[in-house]
Image (cartoon, rainbow, N blue to C red):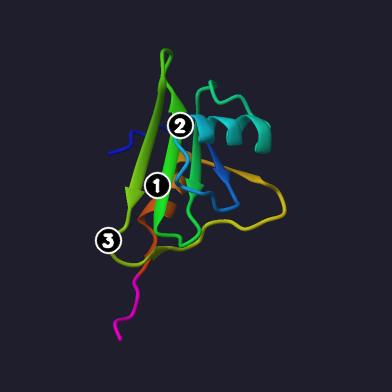
Amino acid sequence: MLQLYANTSVLLATTPQDFRKGIDGFVAVCRDQLQHNPRSDTRFCFINRNRTMVRILTWDSNGYWLMTKRLSKGTFKGWPTTDNPVSTLAAMQLRALLDRVCEQKSK
């Protein structure tokens, strides 16, 4: 489980990302597209195009963590879509976003 505290800094990439990237690819997105320092004490959150996976990148003083949550059913709903490439969230808002899943209807 992801540990989040009230003062945890959270940034969401609003554009879906290619999840074939590894840590170095997401570090480059933070630095080049989001214009933020990936070594800051921030949780950088990304979603895939199908909205079935979320990845969170963070730095912990001597290395990066890249966490993945993949849904077995349904999709994440409520991910912000704006013209701005990044959206700021409170830790409680991220927890709610990760728990908000739209179940797919069976055919």
Identify the secondary structure beneath mark 3.
Answer: loop
Earlier in the chain: of badge 2 and badge 3, it is: 2
Cα distance in 3D space between marks 2 and 1: 22 Å
Please identify the residue farthest to the front as the structure is shown: 20
Between label 2 and label 3, give the one nearer the viewer.
Answer: 2
In magenta stretch: residue 13: no
Mark number for residue 72? 3
Identify the secondary structure beneath mark 1.
Answer: helix
In magenta stretch: residue 106: yes
Cα distance in 3D space between marks 1 and 3: 18 Å
Tell me what residue is drawn at x 50 percent, y 46 percent: 46
Between label 1 and label 3, give the one nearer the viewer.
Answer: 3
- On the image, the x and y values in percent for residue 70 come to 33, 53
- On the image, the x and y values in percent for residue 96 come to 41, 52
* Amino acid type, callout 3: Ser
Q: The N terminus is located in which quarter?
A: top left
Between label 2 and label 1, give the one nearer the viewer.
Answer: 2
Tell me what residue is drawn at x 30 percent, y 86 percent: 107
Q: Which residue is mark 1?
A: 95
10 Å crowding of disc 3: few (<14), some (14-19), many (20+): few
Mark number for residue 23? 2
Tell me what residue is drawn at x 60 percent, y 51 percent: 14
Q: Tell me the magenta residue range.
A: 103-107
Tag 1 near tag 3, CB within 8 Å? no
Q: Nearer the viewer, residue 17 or 37?
A: 17
